[in-house]
Image: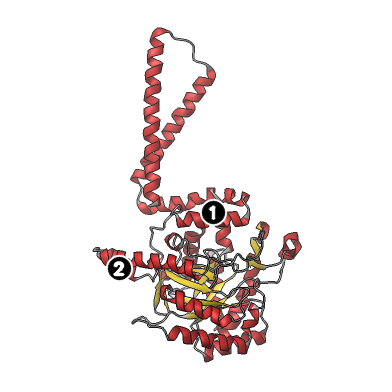
Amino acid sequence: MATRASRKLISDYITKRAISSSVGSCRHCSSAAASSPKIPHFSMKRRLLTGATIGLVIAGGAYVSTVDEATFCGWLFSATKLVNPFFALLDAEVAHRLAVTAASRGWVPREKRPDPANLGLEVWGRKFSNPIGLAAGFDKNAEAVEGFLGMGFGFVEVGSVTPVPQEGNPKSRIFRLRKEGAIINRCGFNSEGIVAVAKRLGAQHGKRKLDETSSTSPSSSEEVKHGGKAGPGILGVNLGKNKTSEDAAADYVQGVHTLSQFADYLVINVSSPNTPGLRMLQGRKQLKDLVKKIQAARDEMQWGEEGPPPLLVKIAPDLSREDLEDIAAVALALCLDGLIISNTTISRPDPVNKNPVSEEAGGLSGKPLFNLSTRILKEMYILTRGKIPLIGCGGISSGEDAYEKIRAGASLLQLYTAFAYGGPALIPQMKAELSECLERDGFKSVLEAVGADCR
């Protein structure tokens, strides 16, 4: 869609310039018959500039009309880098809002090139074309799932979604630490609620089913089958609790009953630092009781051959060894389907602690979180003996970072802050780099490299 729109725009521009140039030439000729005044110097410069512009546009149009779709797709992704400075001038939350709106309306490049073969993998019986996903918190209300999946993410996780709509914490609540490649946020589960999200996901699910049944092309049918409930990619739904709720389990159960039918996997978020008391649910007894209730609510629903969606828990990076042992024990005992490691941190590691913005309350994400979250990831992989799929999240900003997370035990990966700074161009770049890392070390697939540093 983006390719066709771009080509049409160039075509229209060429046509308009050609018409205006023809009219201008006719007027010049008729006036020249009456008199031949000397052409001012500035007019000559203007004509040279106009001619050069038309030449560049014609050349660009010729290039667009002759290059293959993959090359043009790559050009579009690279061109998005030109927009990044504009977003940097805006308030952080305004820029975020604009990015989600652009993705929801299809004003973003769409990946047409196949992912490197060594990036494909299967987790929970679901096929991922690549292991790089968009973390929860970016598309909180499932407004732009198709747009983000279309950019080339292997999966997208929406939310956190609360049962009842809530505004979250007062603004300003998102703060950039650009030099450190970090962000501090204290949004506090701002959400439109499960009803609004269910309507959006339901409409999208219905559209996908209609496309699947009406498609007569074998290739397009194959493309749909290799995705999930959201279409060509996998969709995760992250569930949260309302700030004023006194029964956390009831909030999560309500989310399961309403949204699990649209999800390829579900996440229980008990690790945001911006909802009072939430992290207390990571304690051994609290977590065990919570997971058992949510699993029971999911399993009592009617499911087809594919079965219920996998259930994951997202944990914090600010945990002691004892905390990690407790979580691992609960995960193994209750056969939890996966863990996301990790959420944002309340700590302020170097060099963030030297930045005055670091005094703002909230969770820190981005590059300074990488080492901490990767250490926790590796410990949890060892504690669970590699039996539970882990999603590595926290500070990933390159293919090398992604590869390090995989070697530490992650089967899948998630981006947030690096994507907020780097935009769509980061996605194909990271996939290419990750593919090269695997080839360099002799791994034929992502799964072969999972936990390599823990063996």
Q: Secondary structure at mark 1?
A: helix
Question: Residue 355, how many percent across, how many down?
Answer: 74, 60
**Residue 385 visible (yes or no):** no
- Which is nearer the eye, 36 or 378? 36
The image quadrant that residue 341 belongs to is bottom right
Q: Are marks 1 and 2 in contact (CB under 8 Å)?
A: no
Judged left or right of residue 92, residue 103 is left
Q: Say few, some or many: other residues with alpha carbon within 10 Å of mark 2 (under 14 / 14 to 19 / 20 or more).
A: few
Which residue position is annotated with label 2? 222
- Number of marks in the rendered image: 2
Residue type highlighted by circle 1? Leu
**Residue 414 visible (yes or no):** yes
Question: Residue 402, how many percent across, how many down?
Answer: 53, 69
Residue type highlighted by circle 2? Glu
Q: Which mark is residue 98?
A: 1
Q: Which mark is residue 316?
A: none
Q: Earlier in the sequence, mark 1 or mark 2?
A: 1
Judged left or right of residue 200, residue 343 is right
The image quadrant that residue 398 belongs to is bottom right
Q: Say few, some or many: other residues with alpha carbon within 10 Å of mark 1 (under 14 / 14 to 19 / 20 or more).
A: some
Residue at image position (46%, 28%) is 50
Q: CA distance from mark 1 to mark 2?
A: 33 Å
Residue at image position (64%, 86%) is 283
Tell me: residue 455, above or below residue 101. below
Q: Secondary structure at mark 2?
A: helix
Question: Residue 84, how many percent across, how many down?
Answer: 56, 51
Tell me: residue 94, above or below residue 258. above
Question: Residue 363, how many percent across, how many down?
Answer: 66, 68
Q: For the residues carrying marks 1 and 2, which lies nearer the camera in this image?
A: 1
